[in-house]
Image: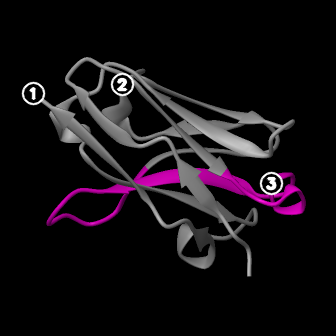
Amino acid sequence: QVQVVESGGGTVQAGGSLRLSCAAPAEIFRTNIMGWYRQAPGKEREFVAQMSRRGGRDFAGFVKGRFAINMDDSKNTMNLQMNNLEPEDTGVYYCNVRPPGTTAIDGTWGQGVQVTVSS
């Protein structure tokens, strides 16, 4: 089974920044769409951002230019740089890896990392 490992969560004050990373085996990293989802307490999991190997990037509307996503081929990792964080960004952030043409439900999830933004 594919192993996807997130890192980089933590606690910051509103307006601060955090960088999340998601590592996957090389053969998976190079062929799949990698994305981030988040789940706040009492809410459903929601899409945050994703990136394909062709370089296409998609972001949720609430990102509003605050987040950036990129892939580091030397480390087989995908990074999510989150700036100007708001308390509403608090939640568990999950990495998802899926083959092109499939949905996140069909993909592989990481264990999640906690992001807490204090006001």
Amino acid type, callout 3: Phe
* 65 shown above or below 5: above
**For the residues carrying marks 3 and 1, which lies nearer the camera in this image?**
1
Mark 3 vs 1, N-terminal side = 3
Residue at the extreme right of the image, as rendered: 27
Q: What residue did someone put label 1 on? A: 119
Amino acid type, callout 1: Ser
Q: Secondary structure at mark 2?
A: loop
Residue 34 part of the magenta segment: yes
Query: Dot 2: within a 10 Å radius of its alpha carbon, few (fewer than 14), some, or many (20 or more) residues?
Result: few
Residue 113: x %, y % from top left: 42, 54
Amino acid type, callout 2: Lys
Measured in 3D between alpha carbons, the distance from the residue under mark 3 to the one under mark 1, in whole angstroms, is 36 Å
Are the residues tagged 3 and 1 within 8 Å (C-beta)? no
Say which of 39 and 63 sits in front: 39
Query: Dot 1: within a 10 Å radius of its alpha carbon, few (fewer than 14), some, or many (20 or more) residues?
Result: few
Mark 2 vs 3, N-terminal side = 3
Residue 119: x %, y % from top left: 9, 27
Write down the region rendered in magenta.
23-47
The residue shown at (33%, 63%) is 45
* 111 shown above or below 49: below
Say which of 48 and 7 sits in front: 7
The residue shown at (55%, 65%) is 110
**For the residues carrying marks 2 and 3, which lies nearer the camera in this image?**
3
Measured in 3D between alpha carbons, the distance from the residue under mark 2 to the one under mark 3, in whole angstroms, is 27 Å
Q: What residue did someone put label 3 on? A: 29
* 110 shown above or below 92: below
**For the residues carrying marks 2 and 1, which lies nearer the camera in this image?**
1
Q: What residue did someone put label 2 on? A: 64
